Image (spheres, rainbow, N blue to C red):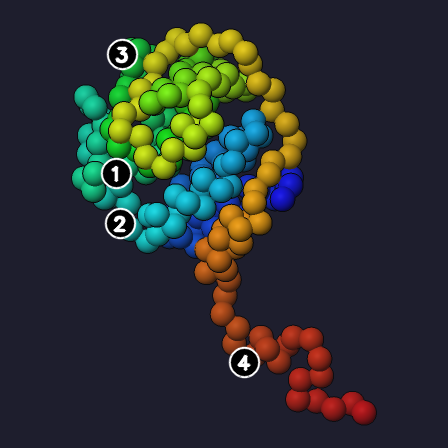
Amino acid sequence: MNHSLNEIEAMCKRAARGAGLPWGLAEEAAKGTRWISSFGFPGAELLAALLEMNDRLPPADLAPLALKGVWSAPSGRMSPLIAGAALSDCAVQLMDAGRIEMERVCVPLLLVPFAAGAALRLETPVAVEWAGVYLATDGRQLCARGAPDAYTAMLADKVAFTTPAEMTDRREPVLRGSAPAEAWDRLGVLAHRTYAPATEASRLRGAGAGLSDND
């Protein structure tokens, strides 16, 4: 299914909230999914998989224990959304060190939009690498080299961020993205949790005559 990037962002934001993410992180997840989808990657499908994988788990279990050395999470698998938000806060640290490493990151492609944000802040390209994949971004464009299956990995044992990075074979963003109907439906199930349950009063205000009879 083909969707506008606005539709993808709106659906992903509601689904992220339905999966228990706080507002700020849900907004970052939606914007990041929109960004990666604009370069032809299956962002919505990957976010659906991640949200189901981590559904309602305590964020502390999926967050980096420390922002020094190799980043890791206490549960043994790290959320790319939480780790990515932390990376954004550590952009200057990345510039100073030239490299930040993480281990056992779920759905690593969803880290790349946060690398794009860091690149914009640093005004220099940032590269993201894991087994079989090299991506580099200046925040506006994306370079990608790797095997299709590696891009959509559900878990990366090691992820490395480096800067400055070389950008070749640049991709230009597009205005629409795609998501399989099955993935869109899975996002919809999560998004539905954010809807207020119907009450007797709301039902009576709905379509139809309710209890009145004007005939």
Task: Give the label, 1 or 3, closer to the camera.
Answer: 1
Distance, label 1 to label 4, CA atoms, is 44 Å
Q: Amino acid at mark 2?
A: Pro
Q: Which mark is residue 145?
A: none
Residue found 45% across the figure and 46% down from its top: 48
Q: Give the CA distance from mark 3 to mark 2.
A: 30 Å
| Local crowd size for mark 4, using a 10 Å CA cut-off: few (<14), some (14–19), many (≥20) | few
Residue 135, how many percent across, how many down?
44, 19
The disc at residue 58 is 2
**Nearest-to-viewer mark from 2 and 1:** 1
The mark found on residue 77 in the picture is 1
Secondary structure type for disc 2: loop
Does residue 100 appear anywhere in the picture?
yes
What is the quadrant of the C terminus in the image? bottom right
**Dot 1 and dot 3 residues touching (CB under 8 Å):** no
Residue at image mark 4: 200
Where is mark 3, residue-wise?
97
Above-or-below relation of 69 to 11: above
- Point out the tag, 2 or 1, that comes first from the N-terminus: 2
The CA distance from mark 3 to mark 4 is: 60 Å
Question: Cα distance, mark 2 to mark 4?
Answer: 34 Å
Front residue of this view, candidates 129 and 28: 129
Which tag, 2 or 4, sits closer to the chain's start?
2
Q: Nearer the viewer, mark 3 or mark 4?
A: 3
Q: Residue at x 38, y 50 (%)?
A: 52
Of the residues under marks 1 and 3, which one precedes in the sequence? 1
